[in-house]
Amino acid sequence: MMEKNAKIFVAGHRGMVGSAIVRALKKEGYENIITRTHKELDLCRQDQVERFFEEEKPDYVFLAAAKVGGIIANSTALADFMYENMILEMNVIHSAWKNGCKKLLFLGSSCIYPRMAPQPMPESCLLTSELEKTNEAYALAKISGLKYCEYLNKQYGTDYISAMPTNLYGPNDNYHPEHSHVLPALIRRFHEAKVNGVKSVTCWGTGTPLREFLYVDDLADACLFLMNNYSGNETVNVGTGKELSIKELTELTAKVIGYEGEILWDTDRPDGTPRKLLDVSKLEKLGWKYQVELEDGIRLAYEDFLNNPMRAER
């Protein structure tokens, strides 16, 4: 168990996941939380990361920092996604180990699993066949991070764990028109269509792919749970175990936002992976289950969007 007065470093605290972890830590009574902005500490700079860990010597690390993006960003900036994520995570994990960090939680992504993985995807299917090409660079970087944690455990007896969340959404999401994930993109588009009285909204693909969504505060709760209750080399999936089609998601989002126009589909656009459902039985057996249902979560996310003055620029 993490001691209440332990020094805890949350890397990426301004992002959607990192900020949720900080909220969860404070809610549970952890006060000694260390954070650094990108300006204060560039995690891609090895010298800066080494100096930070030598000076601060955190007891626990939540590694939630990453370069992320949607289907366009992932498939066009392949080199950037691979380099920045690989360098960032190696710097942090290595310096944590060098400076005696008791435990580290590395956050991956469900895109690390093979494109045609068995559904729902168990943790054991990692590296059994080829990855989805559109986000291969990001996936390879994330696989390297979780494997480095595993190898440190095996070689040096560390207690470094990794968690693989499904598709996330919630407060502090990125609502950029081109660089966001599907749910925040839909929230923005339906909101703007409603405000501007647009009669129809065109969405990408066929609407048939199936996806799972987890509210980010549920993920943060799971991260604290794992930090306090799990040790092991194998990663742990974090999700709801429920899925719906992109078409159903689109209709649900339109309903929550109050958009009553027509929804059209541009079938020349890519669909991505046909199905991506996590097998969450391992986490449920450990004793954790999600709380926030999708419709409630979308409502909370929409409230955040409306209260987020930066939404148009991000």
Image: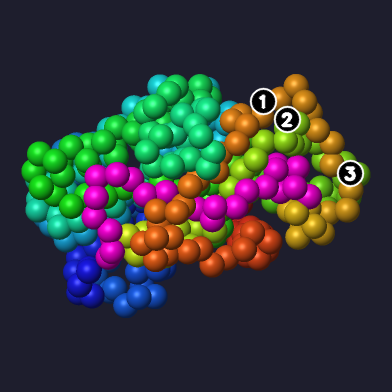
Badge 1 amino acid: Pro
Disc 1 and disc 2 in contact, CB within 8 angstroms: yes
Magenta segment: 227-251
Residue drawn at x 75%, y 47% as measured from the top left: 248
Residue drawn at x 23%, y 75% as measured from the top left: 4
Q: Which residue is mark 2?
A: 205
Q: Position of residue 233 (x, y in %)?
A: 24, 45
- 111 or 236: nearer the eye? 236
Q: Which residue is mark 3?
A: 262
- 113 or 149: nearer the eye? 113
Q: Is 98 contained in the magenta span?
A: no
- 296 or 29: nearer the eye? 296
Instruction: Determine which quarter of the picture holds residue 127.
Output: top left
Q: Position of residue 162 (x, y in %)?
A: 31, 47
When the figure is inspected, residue 285 is found, relative to residue 82, above or below; the finding is: below
Badge 2 amino acid: Gly
Residue drawn at x 16%, y 44% as measured from the top left: 153
> Callout 2: helix, strand or loop?
loop
Specify whether residue 22 is in view. no
In primary-sequence order, the first of circles 1 and 3 is 3
In primary-sequence order, the first of circles 1 and 2 is 2
> Callout 1: helix, strand or loop?
loop
- 284 or 184: nearer the eye? 284
Could you give the CA–CA distance between mark 1 and mark 3, rounded to whole angstroms?
Answer: 21 Å
When the figure is inspected, residue 23 is found, relative to residue 141, above or below; the finding is: below
Q: Which residue is mark 1?
A: 270
Q: Quadrant of the N terminus?
A: bottom left
* Disc 3: CA contacts within 10 A as few (<14), some (14-19) or many (>=20): few
> Callout 3: helix, strand or loop?
strand
Badge 3 amino acid: Glu
Could you give the CA–CA distance between mark 1 and mark 2, rounded to whole angstroms?
Answer: 5 Å
